[in-house]
Image (tube, grey):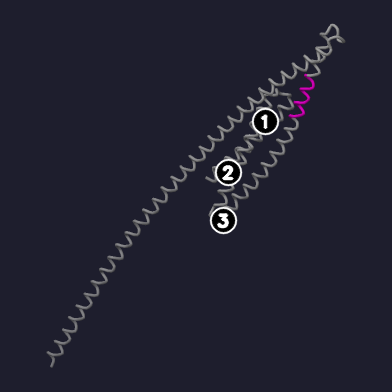
Amino acid sequence: MSNTLYNHCLKLINSISKDLDGLETGIAEDSSAIALAGRQGQLTASLLSLSRSLDDYESMAKRELDAAKKTKALARVKDFRTKLSQLRERFAEMKTQLEDVAHSRNRKELLSRRGFSHEKSENPYASSSAAAYATESNTASSMTRQQGLLHEDSFLNRAESQIDEYLERGRLVLGDLVEQGTMLKSTKRKILDAANTLGITRKTIAFINRRSRQDKILFVLGAIVTFTCFYLIVRWLR
């Protein structure tokens, strides 16, 4: 089970690193806000999953009976936690960049709409207030729709990440059950071998005890016959 958790944590770290690279590329290429928000939600869920998996791995490492394996597992946990901290720091920096990008986009969109409204106006002095109000209203409506789409996409990504996490945990539990089944079969085989060996040993001891009793009886009978012969010989010689 410990090897399974180790491989799972290693896989998560590699996956998060790739997602961070993708998010960085998306920021550099000025990708859509929805795509960037989706990556951000996925990374948040993946980092949380990695943190929980590391907690499980550390708990199992502390219960390890073999001292060498325990030391090795705890060292791996320490290394993974260092990498997790680095990934979180990198993600925090990118979130700051995302906020700057979103602020810049909103500002450009607001300025462009105000400029367009100003050009369309025939009498800017008469309709400036109405144009400004309409622009602000349209901007607010657009931002509300955009926020709704971002929220929906973030929710779907979180749900997908949670489903993936549940499936991964189910796979880990299944692997643990298979490993325990193999261990139980091996233990059963060893017990049967020990029982068979113990049965042979008991038979051997019983055979030795029986032969020992027979040898004692033969020795006593032989001694009686020998002493009887000695007595008869001595008596005949007299």
Check the image and name the residue furthest to the right. 125
Disc count in the image?
Answer: 3
What SS does tag 2 mark? helix
**Which residue is drawn at the image coordinates 54% and 46% (left, top)?**
2
The quadrant where residue 45 appears: top right
CA gap, disc 3 and disc 2: 18 Å
53 left or right of 235 in image:
right
Disc with the residue nearer the chain's start (1 vs 3): 1
Q: Which stretch is magenta?
A: 98-109
Residue 232 in percent (x, y) is at: 14, 87
Residue 148 tag number:
none
Where residue 141 appears, as percent x and y from the top left, is: 72, 18
Chief secondary structure of the magenta portion:
helix
Image quadrant in which you'd find residue 142:
top right
Residue tagged 1:
40
Rounded to the nearest angstrom, the CA distance separating label 1 from label 2 is 25 Å
Is residue 42 magenta-colored?
Answer: no
Frontmost residue, 230 versus 75: 75
Disc 1 residue crowd, few under 14, some 14–19, many 20+, Cα 10 Å: many
Give the amino acid at mark 2.
Tyr
Q: Give the side of residue 7 with respect to residue 141, left or right.
A: left
Task: In the rendered structure, find residue 67 and report the number of the disc placed on it.
Answer: 3
**Vertical position of residue 162 compared to residue 115: above or below:** below
Q: Residue at x 55, y 48 (%)?
A: 60
Q: State the residue at coordinates (42%, 49%).
A: 186
Residue carrying label 2:
6
User: How far apart in space, not on screen, are marks 1 and 3 (Cα)?
Assistant: 40 Å
Q: Quadrant of the C terminus?
A: bottom left
Left or right: residue 92 compared with residue 10:
right
Q: Looking at the picture, which amino acid does disc 1 mark?
A: Gln
